[in-house]
Image (cartoon, grey):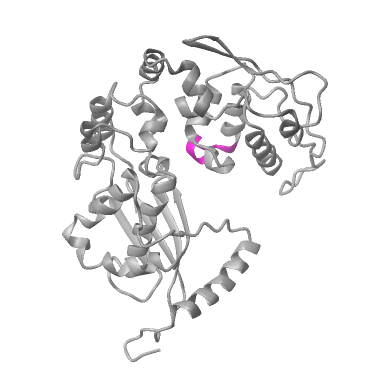
């Protein structure tokens, strides 16, 4: 330790090795480590990721502090970054591992209503929204420095347990850049962070009409899948019987398929009923009273998904992150009500795993 209370400089390679050992211990204790890893020197490249970084750099209060965090995020020092509703938690490797917490005020209703009104009818699908395929007018609205979706300095509160007295230390700066990198791959997290539902910006009726006018109801769906057209996660027609069998036991009846009924209309048939999961623990851990675990819903309906999510007291975004899909998928599932849901085998497998952990 130096005369001023600062730890001596530690080479990056040495810091990484030390941090890795500590993170391994945290993993064993149950932490789902989510590091920020860059493929090159560029921190963010998408509309949302780059927009976040540019927004942070636009404030003079941060001008002298943010650059200190660039090298940290580029060399992989942001070992863990977790985005929740109104909160960012991170672990940054320095001379030691430091815990960073950033609290962000939810977007005020007046601003959100103004953004929704300005974007009404101008965004056709969730895919366009999340990939940043927006017209210039919409881009200007959502990224407006004062009235857009990105937080203002007064709406952010920083905390780091490092010895730096500054409000924004280099570890906090690294985390802010790390958020930009994360938004490159998961832009829906920005809406989760600000406490708003990104689906409210999308005019689904416009998406259907545009697809019909463009004559893409068959060609585009055949090429990319209905999930890509409307931004939802559904079972694709290209799945083979062997792929399905890897997830669920063999069923004698033939798997039902997605059948085009006309150029502008699709009929999605319900999948065959899945048998109850056999390998469900007889007792639920963590409860004083032993009780039989509830079987996996058969059939899996929108109401079942809603009841499950409600029992966990989770938002659609939080529940979606548990399974590794978008909140849009959860919303589309729940809208099916009592109807059975058709979905990809990999998604069904993840749902089964989550069910065992939460019931």
Q: Is residue 328 above or below residue 190?
A: above
Q: Is residue 193 above or below residue 138?
A: below
Q: Quadrant of residue 1?
A: bottom left
Q: Is residue 181 left or right of residue 279?
A: left
Considering every residue shown, the one lying at the far top of the view is 262
Q: Is residue 244 left or right of residue 148?
A: right
- Residue 315 located within the stretch drawn in magenta: yes
**Residue 242: horizontal and vertical position, in percent?**
75, 32
- Residue 298 located within the stretch drawn in magenta: no
**Residue in the picture at 79% in, 26% down:** 275
**Residue in the picture at 59% in, 38% down:** 312
**Residue 67: horizontal and vertical position, in percent?**
27, 67
Q: Is residue 206 left or right of residue 227?
A: left
Q: Is residue 318 above or below residue 72?
A: above
**Residue 77: horizontal and vertical position, in percent?**
44, 68
Which residues make up the magenta segment?
312-318
Q: Nearer the viewer, residue 352 or 101?
A: 352
Q: Nearer the viewer, residue 227 or 156?
A: 227
Q: Nearer the viewer, residue 159 or 317?
A: 317
**Residue 171: horizontal and vertical position, in percent?**
37, 67
**Residue in the picture at 38% in, 60% down:** 175
């Amino acid at each position: 330790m130096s005369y001023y209370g600062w730890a001596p400089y530690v080479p990056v390679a040495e810091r990484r090795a030390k941090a890795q050992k500590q993170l391994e211990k945290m993993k064993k204790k149950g932490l789902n480590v989510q590091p920020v890893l860059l493929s090159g020197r560029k921190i963010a490249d998408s509309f949302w990721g780059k927009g976040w970084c540019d927004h942070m750099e636009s404030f003079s209060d941060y001008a002298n502090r943010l650059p200190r965090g660039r090298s940290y995020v580029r060399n992989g020092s942001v070992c863990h970054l977790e985005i929740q509703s109104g909160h960012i938690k991170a672990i940054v490797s320095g001379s030691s591992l430091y815990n960073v917490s950033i609290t962000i005020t939810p977007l005020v209703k007046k601003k959100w209503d103004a953004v929704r009104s300005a974007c009404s009818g101008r965004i056709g699908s969730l895919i366009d929204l999340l990939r940043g395929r927006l017209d210039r007018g919409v881009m200007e609205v959502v990224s407006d420095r004062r009235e857009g979706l990105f937080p203002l300095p007064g709406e952010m509160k920083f905390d780091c347990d490092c010895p730096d007295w500054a409000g924004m230390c280099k570890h906090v700066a690294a985390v802010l850049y790390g958020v930009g990198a994360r938004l490159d791959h998961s832009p829906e997290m920005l809406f989760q962070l600000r406490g708003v539902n990104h689906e409210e910006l999308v005019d689904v009726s416009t998406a259907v009409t545009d697809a019909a006018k463009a004559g893409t109801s068959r060609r585009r769906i055949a090429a990319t899948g209905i999930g890509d057209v409307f931004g939802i996660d559904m079972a694709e027609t290209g799945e083979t019987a062997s792929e399905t069998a890897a997830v669920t036991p063999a069923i004698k009846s033939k798997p039902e398929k997605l059948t085009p009924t006309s150029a502008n209309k699709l009929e999605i048939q319900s999948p065959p009923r899945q048998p109850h999961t056999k390998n469900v623990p007889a007792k639920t851990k963590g409860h004083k009273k032993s009780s039989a675990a509830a079987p996996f819903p058969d059939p899996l309906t929108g109401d079942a998904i809603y009841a499950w999510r409600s029992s966990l007291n989770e938002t659609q975004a939080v529940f979606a992150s548990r399974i590794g899909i978008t909140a849009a998928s959860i919303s589309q599932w729940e809208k099916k009500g009592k109807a059975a849901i058709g979905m990809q085998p990999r998604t069904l497998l993840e749902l089964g795993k989550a069910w065992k952990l939460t019931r």
